[in-house]
Amino acid sequence: MSKKYEQYTDQELVQFLKENKEIASEAFKVLYDRYSPIVNAYCVKVLGYCSDADDIFQETFIKFFNNVTKEAIKFNIKGYLLTIARNLCLNAKRDQKVKTTEKYFDTIYEYSQPYEQKELLDLINRTLDLLDDEYREAFVLREYNGLEYSEIAELTGITIVNAKSRVFRAKKKIKSILQPYLKEFI
């Protein structure tokens, strides 16, 4: 195929997923490339750095592919993927399968940053583990995934005011935890 699948919209790519195996494979690859960093970052930030986050990340795309080939999806693909990831993360937490490990890796920032920035990012990542799940999730969706408050509210089933409140409280808690360390970086 000589088509440039990258130029197609998400909705067009979803339609291609229902075509023959070769076309579906190319369309899925483009969707995966577009949204895998966002979904992976979400899973890691919500669950911590563990193999379960990787498993849920992979399972999200499997469920997406299975669901999208069965029914017509005519809405925000990023939101749909994050909803799948969210539900899988909540199930994992409920089943108490997630254990935080000391193996940390950075999924968003480059490794060419100065040591002080890496140290500060590591502190922030560790601080996220100390937040209540509802605040961590809202914070991650807003600050790492760039969702609007209305999108966070829709995704988590809360009001916009509640979404704003959770992000604000998460920031406040992070700031209070990091206050002693921030003096070193200023």
Image (tube, rainbow, N blue to C red):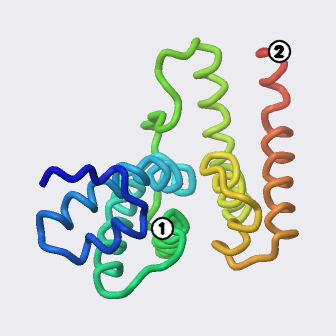
- Give the residue drawn at x 80%, y 38%: 177
- Give the residue drawn at x 53%, y 75%: 75
27 or 122, nearer to the observer:
27
* Quarter of the image that includes the N terminus: bottom left
On screen, residue 146 versus residue 55, left or right, reads right
Residue 100 at least partly seen: no
* Identity of the residue furthest to the bottom in this view: 71
On screen, residue 24 versus residue 47, left or right, reads left
User: Residue 112 at what x, y percent from top left?
Assistant: 49, 15
Residue receiving disc 2: 186
113 or 116, nearer to the observer:
113
Residue type at numbered disc 2: Ile
Measure the C-alpha gap from mark 2 to mark 1: 40 Å
User: Residue 67 at what x, y percent from top left?
Assistant: 34, 81
Q: What element carries label 2?
A: loop
* Quarter of the image that includes the C terminus: top right
Q: What element carries label 1?
A: helix
Count of all numbered marks drawn on residues in the image: 2
User: Residue 92 at what x, y percent from top left?
Assistant: 46, 70
User: Residue 7 at what x, y percent from top left?
Assistant: 37, 51
> Based on the displayed image, in which of its 4 quarters is residue 174 positioned?
top right
Residue type at numbered disc 1: Ile
Residue receiving disc 1: 77
On screen, residue 185 versus residue 79, left or right, reads right
- Give the residue drawn at x 81%, y 76%: 159
Dot 2 crowding, Cα within 10 Å, few <14, some 14–19, many 20+: few
**Sequence order check, earlier mark of 2 and 1:** 1
